Amino acid sequence: MPLPFDNSYARLPARFFAALPPTPVARPGAIAVNHALAAQLGLDADWLAGPEGTAMLAGNLVPEGAEPIAQAYAGHQFGGFVPQLGDGRAILLGELVPPAGTRADLVLKGAGRTPFSRGGDGRAWLGPVLREYVVSEAMAALGVPTTRALGCVLTGETVYRDGVHKPGAVLARVASSHIRVGTFEYFAARADEEALAKLCDHTISRHYPEDDTALDLLASVTAAQARLIAAWMSFGFIHGVMNTDNCALSGETIDYGPCAFMDAYHPKKVFSSIDARGRYGYANQPQIALWNLAQLGSCLLPLIGAGEQAVSEAQTVLDGFAPAYQEAWLARMGRKIGLAAATPEDRPLIEALLNRMASEGADFTRTFRGLSTGTAAQEFTDPQAFETWAPEWRARIAREHDPEAVMAAANPVRIPRNHRIEEMIAAAVAGDYAPFHRLHAALAAPFTPVESFADLEAAPRPEERVARTFCGT
């Protein structure tokens, strides 16, 4: 089947990437194909699920029109700069241009070694592949900008992780692009202003065609990141590894490594096993996003202008992050308590509820959903902690037109809870993919109550709680 490729990134200078095909695997085996996404991309889902499509998703068949590359980038990882990272186990097959829709990268994650692998095997194992598939698609259903999962396949090989051989898999990931803050850092670290200018022009053309200058680009990315992080916060999502190489200029969520959705709410919650100091904890995410944007601003300075004037202009743009984020956060959190258009005067009411939730360990998702169903107090160890807050809230929403509808549209019934993801992975490793398919189906319509999925709405019992999440690459 011919695919609608037009590979603009591959037409950039050779130092932007390494050109190489995916490494074939032993026995490709289909696990899932995202039929809805395939249709959006103008692809035949039945072909993707068949032998040739499975071979392509595994990296064994390079389709006509593809120009496979591994992209070069650098990155600040937990605050420390690494001048060369790059795609160590991902291959960008090319850019799909559907008949109706926007250009999208098609990447195979776990596609074998590249010049950027740094001693790694270039492969992925089944657990992280299924986690990214489920969580990224759940995020899309929640309306959060994100990369998407087109499909995943088994490789018929094993990978060695944590002293154990585990089943290998490949994820086919779709994104608006894979241009990162770290991509700009790669060329800035080499003082390659020509490459920075080409990358800037390419990013503007691809994502922000209304922009003209590097300063415009910085402003657009800053606004996009403010909206994205506010969305994360409104659903209790913790990315877990907000390095600059995982900060996409498109404003999409990228890289679902040690990510998690909170059960019991606390602003300092950390799940990532590699985040020993809590740098990327829940409440830190807005300031880390700004820190990442500051690194982008530094990279763009040679293109913005000379001297203190350029620094001042970039700083003015970055100073706009906080108010943009606060505005987006207030709008989202206001809707979660039934306010169609929250005002700054409503902020203390929202924060008072969050403070009570934190002190009581109330479930984030179930508490907010319970506001419209009358069950929120049940999420508190001491229901009186909720009832002392509720009268002011009830008085406030009494002035709203239809607060129940506003809350129902803002508060999901189901999220990809950590213990369910772990159960899904364990079952798949044992050869049972039914929990994976069921969880994926349940999360496709997260705001709609479905009786047959009621068990997936429940908070974990104490013995089911997941305290740490792992990259598991």
Image (cartoon, rainbow, N blue to C red):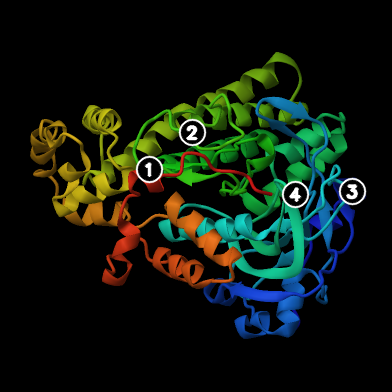
Residue at 54%, 31% (x, y): give it.
280
Image quadrant in which you'd find residue 344:
top left
- What secondary structure is found at the residue carrying circle 4? helix
Between 326 and 138, which is closer to the camera in this rendering? 138
Residue type (three-letter) at the residue carrying disc 4: His
**C-alpha separation, residue under disc 3 versus residue under disc 1:** 39 Å
Residue at 33%, 55% (x, y): give it.
412
**C-alpha separation, residue under disc 2 versus residue under disc 4:** 36 Å
> Nearer the N terminus, badge 1 or badge 4?
4
> Nearer the N terminus, badge 4 or badge 3?
3
**Mark toward the viewer: 1 or 4:** 1
Residue on which disc 2 sits = 270
Residue on which disc 1 sits = 234
Residue at 50%, 37% (x, y): give it.
271
Residue type (three-letter) at the residue carrying disc 3: Pro
- What secondary structure is found at the residue carrying circle 3? loop
**C-alpha separation, residue under disc 1 versus residue under disc 4:** 32 Å
**C-alpha separation, residue under disc 4 versus residue under disc 3:** 24 Å
**C-alpha separation, residue under disc 3 versus residue under disc 2:** 33 Å
**Quadrant into which the N terminus falls:** bottom right
The answer to whether residue 245 of the structure is visible from this angle is yes
Left or right, 420 with reference to 352 = right
Residue on which disc 3 sits = 115
**Mark toward the viewer: 2 or 4:** 2
Residue type (three-letter) at the residue carrying disc 2: Val
Query: x, y (%) of residue 341?
Result: 26, 43
Q: Residues within 10 Å of mark 4 (few under 14, many from 20)?
A: some
The answer to whether residue 447 of the structure is visible from this angle is no
Left or right, 315 with reference to 4 = left
- What secondary structure is found at the residue carrying circle 2? loop
